[in-house]
Structures are given as C-alpha cells and as structure tokens.
Image (cartoon, rainbow, N blue to C red):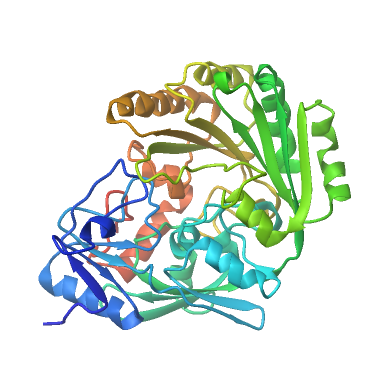
Amino acid sequence: MVELTGRVIYAGEAGYEDARLNFNTRYSASPFAIVFCQSVKDVINAVNWAQMSGIPIRVRSGRHSYEAFSVANDALIIDLNEMEQIHIDDGEVTIQAGAELVPIYETLSSQGVTIPGGSCASVGITGLTLGGGYGLLARWKGLTCDSLLSVEMVSAAGKIIAASSSQNADLFWALRGGGGGNFGIITSLTYQAHSIDKVTVYQLSWNWSEIERIVQFWQTWASQTDDRHTSILKLVPESVDSVFVVGQFVGTEAELRQVLAPLLELAPKAVSIETLPYIEAVYAFAGLKPGYPKRLAHWHGSQTKFKNASDYVARPLNADGIATVVRFLKQTPSKNIVLQFDSYGGAIAKIPSDATAFPHRQVLFNIQYQTYWTKPQDQTAHINWVRNFRAAMQPYVTGGCYVNYCDRDLKNWQTAYYGNNWQKLKQVKQKYDPGNFFQFEQSVTK
C-alpha cells in the first residue's frame, strides 16, 4: 500500500480546523484528510493512495474556489500551497503550483519583469491560470494563460506529463482556460515573463446620480482604448453615493491623461492619478497598504461569506439594461455590494476564441455580481439579490460566464463557461482522465 507523504492532517488532529477552511466561509466541509504536498513525489503518492483506497479527492492550491469546489466531505484534499518555489531563467519563469500571486509579483519585480495575473493577494497561480486569468495587465499582455509556455502535471495514473504547444498540445490547449481540477494535478507552470517598470494608476469618481451617464459612456469606451490600459467600472449601492472608474496604464501620466480625456470630460468629482513602481500598484490594488486605490473585489475577514457570479457582455447595454442595473443597485440588501465591470478587448481579443479553451475573447466586458455578509440571517437576502439580478440581466448579456467566478446556480454551466470549446474539452478529458478520477460538482466529463 502506498503511503501518504508530505504534511498530512487527518480529521480530528491538531490543525485540522484551519486546514479544512475555504476562503468563502459560507461553505464548511469535513474532509477525510488534507495532505499538504512538499514535492511532486508527494502528489504522486497522494494520487496513487487515493486510487487504491477508493476515497475521492479534491485538488487545492489557493483555497479561492468561490463555491468551494476544492474541498468536500470525506474526501482527501491534495493541497499544493506549500509548493511555492519560483525560478527565473532567460525571460522565462517556472512557478510551482502552490505559489500565491503577491509573492510571485514580488519575486519577479526584483528582476524587472512580471506576468499578467489577478489582483487578489492570496489567489493561487494555478487556479487563476487554468481558468484563464484576468487582471489589470490583461488588455496589455492578455490573460494569464496567454503567457503560459508549458506545464508539468501528475495524471490519474500517477505519472508525470509535460504539456506545451509541441508536447501533448491538446492537453496544453485545454489547460489554458479549461478550468482547474479537471485533467490532472498541475505541479509547476512555466510562463513568458514581460519587462515592466512603472505604471500609472487612477481612480475617478462621480456622484451616484450620474450612474446612467457613466455606464453608457464607459461600456463603449473602455474596451477600445490603448491596449496598455485596463479599466474597471465599480458600481455600489445608491446609499454609498459614488460611481468609480479605476484602472492601470503601462506608461506615463501624460499618456494616460490622453487616454482618459473623454472620461475626464464627464467632470468627475474626484480625480487621483499616480505613477509608481509596478509592485507598488500591486500592493495598492490588493489592499495591502492604506491609500489609493481602494480594494476592488474582496474582504479578507475570517467570517466573511459571499456569493459572486458573472456575465459577459458583447453588445453595449441598452437603456433597459442600464435601467435594470440601476434598479437593483437601488434595492440592495446591504452596503456590502459591488457590481464590477471589467474591460476586455486589447490583447485578450487578438487570440481566436478556439485557440485556447478560454472562449470569451470577443466581448466588451465582464460583469461581476458581488455580495458579502457575516451574519447567517443575512444570507438568503444576499444570495437572492444576486440570483434575481442575474436573471433580470439575461436579455442583455451573452449567456457566457467566467469559470474562475464559478457559480453553482448555473444550469448550463458547460456552455456558459466554455462555449463552443466544450466538446473538445470532453475529448481531452477522455484521453487524459478516462476513469473520471478528477471530478467535482462542475468538472469536465468525458
């Protein structure tokens, strides 16, 4: 019998309560055990042990699965978070699968380079990449998966597989946007690094009464601007009385002011523009220090529960669509609500929709519906707000959703996440995991 190796914590042992936690504390699972792998051999042993024991597995690195798909009752959790080495060589960076974003950015920044990724500090690089990977450099250098060169993966048979454009190319295609936990356990990823020095970040705000005018303008403007610029429209409840546009530009303040000129003509009540080293912008957007800009997406409270969902928008919202947005922001269950529009276009759109498993290339923006609470009695109202809002928006959106903002409510999640790429993903699943060893509530099936 193969033994579990690494740092293994069984139910009831010291450290188990912390080890079983998910970022979204709305979910609470009681797994059989959690194995924190220290090496590829530990991963192989965990896979082989689970195959022989018949105990189901879940794979985890950053714990950020919005719907806690990376944990389950009575399962073996194979956690890679303690495998976090980063190696830079001749313009390429190889990262072990458990590394989190801010330590990666810090290491790369010391060499004057980066990779495009997300802004939440503790998100794991692997899940981000496998789902596509949107962030504030996306319109400049594409999604995180667009800089991916190769991966190392442990298969359901406990074998090491390499995938790249020249080796197991079908698997490499699937791993660029096909979601985490579907085909095997990624143990390391190699990316093309991109030189970066200073960036210019900004925050503009208007009174909430300006919301229709700002939405109308932003939605047709943001995806058409300079590719070095990624913009986010941040809408909050009427009671907060502000509408925000924030973003990042890989260039100077003078250049950015030219990009922003049409938006500045809408007379914001407050303007903040600052050029700073890229790593300082990372800290600011991650909310790791006081000041500008405010954190975009997450609260890091230990008791925070949330329901997030998404939609893609390919055509500008018409008057009825904008009116729907306004109506729901006037009827929020609390102030802990954010409706975020993430601009696409630029480098994202220059890659064909079938060139990688990530299909949502030709869209204007992604909508994130975000709601947060701490008290159990507030849960139903917050979840219903998201569900009802999404339902009301369906006439105005594409029907597509971002797999990294996974949503248990989706009935047609296969095509919502993967569009026309779903059938090819099933074929890759059949080839690399014919026994469906890697499975969860919304996993790719053969």
Q: Position of residue 335 (x, y in %)?
A: 49, 25
Q: Which residue is drawn at 57% across and 48% down?
A: 287
Q: Which residue is drawn at 41% across and 44% down?
A: 301
Q: Position of residue 416 (x, y in %)?
A: 43, 42
Q: In which quarter of the image is the N terminus?
A: bottom left
Decide: is 216 above or below 51: above
Q: Nearer the viewer, residue 434 or 442?
A: 442
Q: Position of residue 265 (x, y in %)?
A: 85, 28
Left or right, 83 with reference to 140:
left
Left or right, 437 with reference to 416:
left
Q: Which of 246 and 348 is in front in this view?
A: 246
Decide: is 380 above or below 229: above
Asked whether the viewer can see residue 141, the reply is no
Decide: is 226 above or below 111: above
Left or right, 8 with reference to 432:
left
Q: Residue at x 45, y 24 (%)?
A: 389
Q: Position of residue 202 (x, y in %)?
A: 73, 43
How many badges with numbers are in the image? 0
Choose top left, top right, bottom left or bottom right for residue 175: bottom left
Q: In which quarter of the image is the C terminus?
A: bottom left
Asked whether the viewer can see residue 156, the reply is yes
- Outermost residue, front direction? 290
Q: Which of 263 and 316 is in front in this view?
A: 263
Decide: is 205 above or below 112: above
Q: Which residue is drawn at 48% across and 77% down?
A: 85
Choose top left, top right, bottom left or bottom right for residue 80: bottom left
